[in-house]
Structures are given as C-alpha cells and as structure tokens.
Image (cartoon, rainbow, N blue to C red):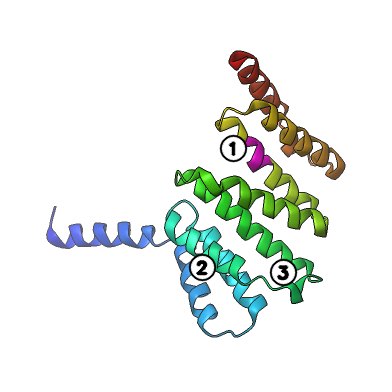
Amino acid sequence: MSIVATLIFSFSLFSTAFTQEDSIIIECKIKLKSTQSIKEKAKFYYELSENYGFKNLDSSLVYAQKLVNLYDSDFDKDTSFIKLIANGYNNIGVLNRFAGKIENTFSYLFKAAEMLEIINDKPSLTDTYNNISIIYSQAGNYSKSLEYRYKVVKLSKELNDFAKRNFREVFRILERYFRAS
C-alpha cells in the first residue's frame, strides 16, 4: 500500500473515531466556560458526565461530582434542577460500582432516590431503583435486590412502561436467592 493510501486510510479511521459524543463533550465544555448560571452549569456537568460515561470513568465521576456540588437549598422548589442533581448522585453511585469503589455506591444511589421521591419523578426513580436492585444482586443481597426490583415493577406498572417491568430479572434474582440459601 502506498504512503498516500495509508495516510488516507489512517485519517478516515481517526475521523470516524471522532464521534458525535466527542463533539458534544467539546461543545459542552465551551458552553460551560461561557456561563455563570448555576442551572446551566448543572446541565452541562450532567451532559459531560453522561457523555464521558464508561469511556472515561474518572472524567465522568469528576463532572458528576461537580454537578452534585452545585446543590443549593435555594433551588429546592426547582424540580428540573433537583432532577439534575439527583441524576448526578445516581451517576456517581453507578460509576463507583464500575470503578470498584463499592463502599459509597449505595449512599449516592439512596440520595438520588430520596431527591427523586421528593419531586415525584417516577421515571427517574424507576431507573435509580433499578440500579439499586442490580447492585444489591451483584453484591449477593438478593432479598434487598428483590425489594427494589418490586419497586421498579410497581412504578413501571403505574407509568405503563412495559419495557422496565423486566420480569425475567425478578426470576433471575429469585433463582440466585434460592441457590444462596
């Protein structure tokens, strides 16, 4: 293969690697530098944490932590702000689990659930309960996992969200529970 063909091929691989997610990260960082609004900063920190996700756990955790650090009781009546903060706590809990830092995982997830219960955000609460159920199951605490799985199923039924009812997961947890007994 000629040098030109190799360079063209390499460039095409590089340009494909520069994904839409990367452009969102760059855009959020630019907008973050230009805003003084706490609510806007919260939105951008959340977007950065989400878009770094599992590609870069450390960066995702940093932005989620910056997000939750923005919490101020002056915003207690602002449900969209509280939801962002709660989702930041949820992200920290999940990311800590994947990073092997289990000791604080539940405290962050429970804080997220508490905030979401206060603002009555059932769709987000369903996701947080689901994460709690999964992590309890992975930790071998199947009775607690089932308790939170039941909450997921109950809320999903209320929301008419059949996708999250995942009854197979209930049976998997029950199977693990009875094997461990």
Q: Quadrant of residue 81?
A: bottom right
**Badge 1 local density, few (<14 within 10 Å), some, or many (20+)?**
many
Magenta extent: 130-134
Q: Nearer the viewer, residue 82 or 12?
A: 82
Can you identify the residue that label 2 sits on?
Answer: 24
Task: Give, as a three-letter code, the residue at label 2.
Answer: Ile
Between discs 1 and 2, the one toward the N terminus = 2
Please give the name of the residue rendered at 59% of the width and 65% of the height, measured from the top-left corner.
46
Amino acid of disc 1:
Ile
Above or below, comparing residue 131 to residue 112 in the picture: above
Closest to the observer, 72 or 161: 72
Q: Is residue 162 visible?
A: no
Q: Residues within 10 Å of mark 2 (few under 14, many from 20)?
A: some
Residue 161 position, x and y percent, is 79, 41
Look at 48% across and 68% down and name the residue there.
Answer: 25
Residue appearing at x 61%, y 65% in the figure: 68
Give percent across and percent down for residue 117.
80, 53
Q: Position of residue 64 (x, y in %)?
A: 55, 62
Query: Could you tell which of marks 3 and 2 lies nearer the N-terminus?
Result: 2
Can you tell which mark lies on residue 135? Answer: 1
The Cα atoms of the two marked residues, 3 and 1, are separated by 26 Å
- Give the label, 3 or 2, closer to the camera: 3
Element on which disc 2 rests: helix
User: Picture coordinates of residue 95 (x, y %)?
Assistant: 51, 50
Relative to 41, is 57 on the left or the right? Answer: left
- Disc 1 + disc 2, Cβ < 8 Å: no
Q: Determine which residue is flagged by label 3.
A: 81
Residue lying furthest left = 2
